[in-house]
C-alpha cells in the first residue's frame, strides 16, 4: 500500500495554509494571491479550488506535496 500523502484532493485550502505555512507561497503561485486571504479558503477543497481556477486537482496535490517535501 502506498504511503498516504499529507495533502489530498479533499484537503481544505485553509487547512493547508494553517498546517503548512511553508506552502503559502506555493498556494499563491498555484491558485493566485487572492486565495491566501479569501475567507472561503476555509471551506473549499483543493479539488473545488483547482476546478475553479482551471487546474487539474491531482497535479495541484502533487505540486503541493513536492513543495512540502522540499520545505522539510
Image (cartoon, rainbow, N blue to C red):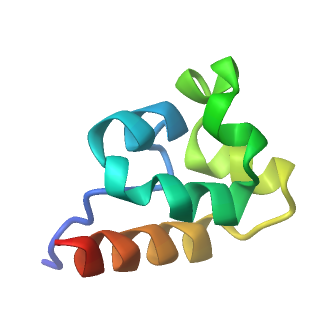
Residue 9, position as x, y percentages in the image: 50, 54
Which of 43 and 14 lies nearest the eye of the viewer?
A: 14
Which of 25 and 39 lies nearest the eye of the viewer?
A: 25
Q: From the viewer's perspective, is 30 left or right of 51?
A: left
* Residue lying at 35% horizontally and 34% vertically, measured from the top left: 18
Residue 60, position as x, y percentages in the image: 58, 69
Above or below, 25 against 44 in this view is below
Above or below, 37 against 56 in this view is above
Residue 39, position as x, y percentages in the image: 65, 18
Q: From the viewer's perspective, is 36 left or right of 16?
A: right
Which residue in the rendered view is the most extreme toward the top?
Answer: 39
* Residue lying at 43% horizontally and 40% vertically, measured from the top left: 17
Which of 46 and 26 lies nearest the eye of the viewer?
A: 26
Image quarter in which the N terminus is found: bottom left
Residue 31, position as x, y percentages in the image: 72, 55
Image quarter in which the C terminus is found: bottom left
Q: From the viewer's perspective, is 72 left or right of 48?
A: left
The image quarter in which residue 5 lies: bottom left
Above or below, 35 against 4 in this view is above
* Residue lying at 40% horizontally and 44% vertically, measured from the top left: 16
* Residue lying at 34% horizontally and 57% vertically, measured from the top left: 22
The image quarter in which residue 54 lies: bottom right
Which of 63 and 5 lies nearest the eye of the viewer?
A: 63
Amino acid at each position: 500500500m502506498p504511503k498516504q500523502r499529507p495533502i489530498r484532493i479533499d484537503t481544505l485550502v485553509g487547512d493547508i495554509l494553517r498546517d503548512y505555512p511553508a506552502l503559502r507561497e506555493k498556494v499563491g503561485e498555484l491558485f493566485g494571491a487572492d486565495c491566501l486571504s479569501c475567507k472561503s479558503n476555509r471551506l473549499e477543497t483543493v479539488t473545488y479550488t483547482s476546478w475553479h481556477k482551471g487546474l487539474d486537482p491531482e497535479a495541484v496535490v502533487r505540486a503541493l506535496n513536492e513543495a512540502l517535501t522540499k520545505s522539510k
